[in-house]
Image (spheres, rainbow, N blue to C red):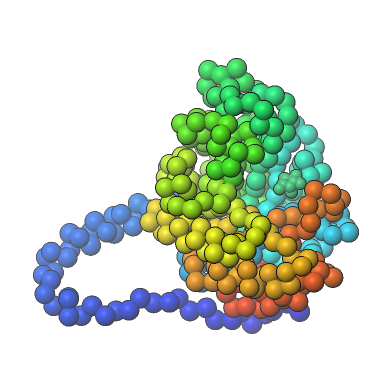
């Protein structure tokens, strides 16, 4: 049931209702103002990396434009496993429910820093690399998260027993050398992301996420504002300047928040970040309202800064809330310019949490088809013809 007739999504033009005002303003006054506005707009059109590759610049600009047209759907680890299966080529729980693949694919790099062959979710990095290539060739978007281990204690990303981990990895810290090894392995992987013709594949890199909470070693109560920002700067400068990597778009991604000030408290800088995002799971009745409020703030800030915006992780009680996709996820986001919303993984081993993505037999599957059919949502077939990389 793959859709081929992409529904029309016209740009909503602004009202050109300013002719009266226009008469009174001399053209000589307008020219300098226009020149400044154009200069400001030009300054904001590119990614944070001034040397970003052509495909990366194109992806950045296309994602900004596409936000006005529709909301891409994303799913973590969609192509590698689902409910009751693992590693079956071409298989996807999302496709089995609605007939198309997600437009955005999330991948996890945790344990790459150790030189391990597979991630903390047991997915081989070779597999991830090859599927990133497939998704790129089909016109979809790849985004990479990184639940990297605690470099001071040797524990997991969730080991919050020490409040000096970030300090320890910064220059001069006792784990700085080890951390450069971690970053080195990350850089090697990024440099291996090439298409068949040798072009570097642009990806959205989303490290140090949910830092407004305190459950990861880089979280709010585990480091100071300045340490968190320095961690970001060190990471981006290492990848960009030391390793000459120019095909990454960097995502700043908080957990839930209430105000713009709270959102921006640890923002590391416009020269480092391309995508403004947040993670928000449905954990109670306030979810639609909170989702809308966070999305409005992030979308507005992204527009002001010349960046793009997304809901980088979400998920809800889809086993019991049968209209979750349309009523609780889509409606609050419908009128807000956002690049995508990505729901978290469908663990094949069970245990860690219930599946957040749609899957056959799930009570909310019919509602996911409505979500898919809605003209505002975009899946892989709908983004590939317009190729986001050209
Ligand atoms: C978490 C859970 C974990 C997983 C981690 C990294 O939210 O899904 O089971 O290991 O993300 O993907």
Q: Hey, which residue is sitting farthest front in the picture?
A: 285
Q: How many marks?
A: 0
In terms of depth relative to the viewer, which is nearer, 95 or 265? 265
Which residue is rendered at x = 45% and y = 42% of the image? 265
- On screen, residue 383 above or below 215: below
In terms of depth relative to the viewer, which is nearer, 117 or 67? 67
Which residue is rendered at x = 23% and y = 78% of the image? 18
Please provide percent x and percent y for residue 299. Answer: 46, 60
Q: Quadrant of the N terminus?
A: bottom right
Q: Is residue 383 visible?
A: no
In terms of depth relative to the viewer, which is nearer, 199 or 2? 2
Please provide percent x and percent y for residue 192. Answer: 67, 42
Which residue is rendered at x = 65% and y = 46% of the image? 145
The image quarter containing residue 103 is bottom right
Please provide percent x and percent y for residue 360. Answer: 83, 69
Which residue is rendered at x = 27% and y = 59% of the image? 37
Q: Is residue 158 visible?
A: yes
Please provide percent x and percent y for residue 295. Answer: 51, 60
């Amino acid at each position: 049931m793959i859709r081929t007739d992409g529904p029309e999504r016209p740009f909503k033009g602004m009202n050109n209702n300013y002719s009266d005002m226009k008469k009174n303003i001399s053209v000589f006054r307008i020219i300098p103002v226009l020149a400044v506005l154009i200069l400001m707009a030009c300054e904001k059109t590119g990614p944070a990396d001034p040397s970003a590759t052509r495909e990366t610049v194109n992806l950045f600009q296309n994602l900004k434009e596409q936000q006005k047209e529709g909301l891409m759907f994303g799913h973590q680890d969609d192509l590698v496993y689902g409910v009751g299966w693992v590693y079956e080529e071409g298989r996807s729980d999302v496709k089995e429910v609605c007939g198309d693949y997600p437009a955005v694919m999330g991948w996890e790099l945790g344990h790459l820093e150790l030189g391990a062959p597979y991630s903390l979710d047991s997915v081989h990095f070779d597999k991830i690399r090859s599927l990133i290539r497939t998704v790129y060739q089909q016109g979809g978007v790849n985004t990479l998260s990184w639940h990297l281990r605690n470099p001071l204690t040797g524990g997991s990303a969730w080991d919050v027993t020490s409040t000096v981990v970030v300090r320890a990895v910064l220059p001069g810290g006792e784990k700085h050398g080890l951390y450069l090894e971690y970053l080195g392995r990350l850089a090697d992987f990024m440099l291996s992301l090439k298409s068949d013709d040798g072009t570097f594949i642009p990806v959205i890199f989303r490290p140090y996420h949910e830092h407004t909470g305190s459950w990861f070693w880089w979280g709010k109560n585990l480091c100071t504002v300045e340490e968190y920002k320095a961690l970001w700067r060190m990471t981006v400068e290492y990848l960009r300047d030391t390793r000459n990597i120019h095909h990454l778009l960097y995502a700043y991604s908080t957990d839930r928040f209430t105000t713009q000030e709270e959102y921006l408290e640890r923002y590391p800088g416009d020269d480092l970040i391309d995508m403004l995002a947040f993670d928000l799971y449905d954990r109670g009745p306030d979810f639609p309202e909170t989702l809308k409020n966070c999305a409005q703030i992030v979308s507005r800030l992204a527009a002001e800064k010349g960046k793009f915006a997304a809901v980088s992780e979400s998920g809800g009680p889809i086993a019991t809330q049968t209209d979750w996709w349309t009523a609780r996820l889509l409606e609050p986001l419908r009128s807000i310019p956002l690049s995508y919303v990505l729901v978290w993984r469908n663990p094949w081993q069970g245990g860690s949490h219930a599946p957040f993505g749609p899957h056959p037999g799930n009570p909310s599957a019919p509602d996911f088809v409505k979500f898919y059919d809605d003209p505002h949502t975009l899946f892989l077939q709908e983004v590939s013809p317009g190729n986001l990389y050209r």
